[in-house]
Image (cartoon, rainbow, N blue to C red):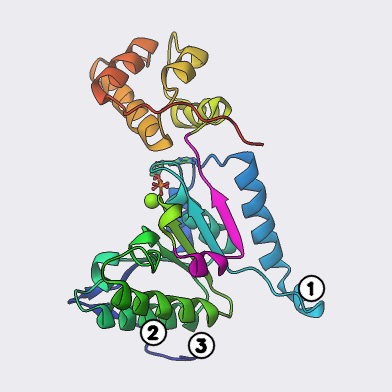
Amino acid sequence: MSKSSTNNRLPRAKGIDMASIYTPKECARKVRHIVLHPSNKQIVEEFIKIIHMKEKFEEHDVPIPNKVVMFGPPGTGKTLTAFYIAQQLDIPLIVVRLDAIIHSHLGETASNMRKIFDYAKSSPCVLFLDEFDAIARTRDNSDEIKEMARVVNTLLQCLDEFQGDSIFAAATNLEDELDQAVWRRFDTKMVYHMPDVASRRAYIRLLIADFEQEDLLYEPITDLLSGCSFADIEQIVLKAKRKAIIESSPLTFDHMRGSYMEYKPKVMAEPVPIN
Ligand SMILES: Nc1ncnc2c1ncn2[C@@H]1O[C@H](COP(=O)(O)OP(=O)(O)O)[C@@H](O)[C@H]1O
Ligand SMILES: [Mg+2]
C-alpha cells in the first residue's frame, strides 16, 4: 500500500474495525499526568530523539529503531507510554483490537494481522498491540503448536517487513511466554514496575494538583499508597475527591484513607528501585 492511497480505511474483521485511532491531540490529553521511571524516561527520550534525527542516521547508514516492547504488571503505564510516543512524534496511535483480529481460524488471524500491519505502513503512526502474549506465545509451549506457529510466523514476517515512518509498540504482562524469535525482533525494550516512592509522590502531586485541600500530608499519603499501581492510585485519589465534593469540603487525609479502605487495592510488595 502506498502513501498516496486515497482509500485509507481501517481494515475490518467480524463486522468491526480492527483498531481504534487516536489523534496526537487525543494522545496529549491522555498523557497529561504520565510519570515514567527515570530509566524508562531515558529510553523513551532517546528513542524519540533518534526518530527526530532520522536524516542524520541515514547519512551514517545506521538504522533507526522502530519496534518497542514493554512488559510489567498491569496499571504501570505500558499503554500510556504508547500514547506518549505517538504524542511526542505527533502521529496518530492505532490501538489494535485483539477481539477483532483473533479468529477461531488461525489462518484468518494471520491474515488479519497482515492487514493491520499493511494499514500501519501506509502512513506514519504508532501501531500498538496490547496483550501481545495472546499472539506471540512461545511456539513450543502450546497444544496447538503448529497452528499457533503459523500466526507467530506471520507476525515475524510482519515485524521484519515493518519499515518506513511508523513505529510498532507491544505490551505484555507475561514476558516469559513470548516467543524468543519475536522477542529478538524488538530494538527497544522497557520493563515496568509498581511505582517506587518517588514515582508515587510525583504522581499523587500531579493528580491532586490544585484541588482544594487541607491537612493534606503528602508523605503519609505516599506511604498509604505503597504497593499500589498507578492505576490504583488514580482511582483512590478520584474517589477521595468525590468524597470531598459531596461534603463541600477541601480534600483531607481522612478522605484518602477512607477511599483507600473502600477501594481495597491488591497491594503488592514494593519493588527494589532500579536506577
Ligand atoms: N506511569 C504512569 N503514569 C501516570 N499514570 C499512569 C501510569 N501508569 C498507569 N497510569 C494510569 O493508569 C491507567 C492505566 O494504565 P495503563 O497504561 O493502561 O497500564 P498498563 O498498560 O501498564 O496496564 C492510565 O490510563 C493512567 O491513568
Ligand atoms: Mg495496558
* Label 3 packing within 10 angstroms: few (<14), some (14-19), many (20+): few
Mark closer to the chain start, 1 or 3: 3
- In-front residue for pair 88/246: 88
Marks 1 and 2: in contact by CB < 8 Å?
A: no
Disc number placed over residue 67 in the picture, else none: none
- In this rendering, the label closer to the viewer, 2 or 1: 1
Q: Is residue 149 magenta?
A: no
Q: Which residue is mark 2?
A: 8
At numbered mark 1, what does the secondary structure look like: helix, strand or loop? helix
What residue type is disc 2 on?
Answer: Asn
Amino acid on which the number 3 mark rests in the picture: Lys
Which residue ends up furthest to the right in the rendered image? 60
The span picked out in magenta is 179-194
Q: Alpha carbon of mark 1 to alpha carbon of mark 3: how far?
A: 23 Å
Report the disc number at residue 3.
Answer: 3
The amino acid sitting under disc 1 is Lys
Q: Is residue 244 visible?
A: no
Note whether 217 is above or below 115 in the view shown.
above
Residue 119 in picture, x, y percent from top left? 41, 81
Which quadrant, please, contains the C terminus?
top right
Query: 156 and 202: which one is in front?
Result: 156
Element assignment for label 2: loop
Q: Earlier in the sequence, mark 2 or mark 1?
A: 2
* Mark-to-mark CA distance, 2 and 1: 30 Å
Report if the beta carbon of the residue with label 3 is closer than 8 angstroms to ligand 2. Answer: no
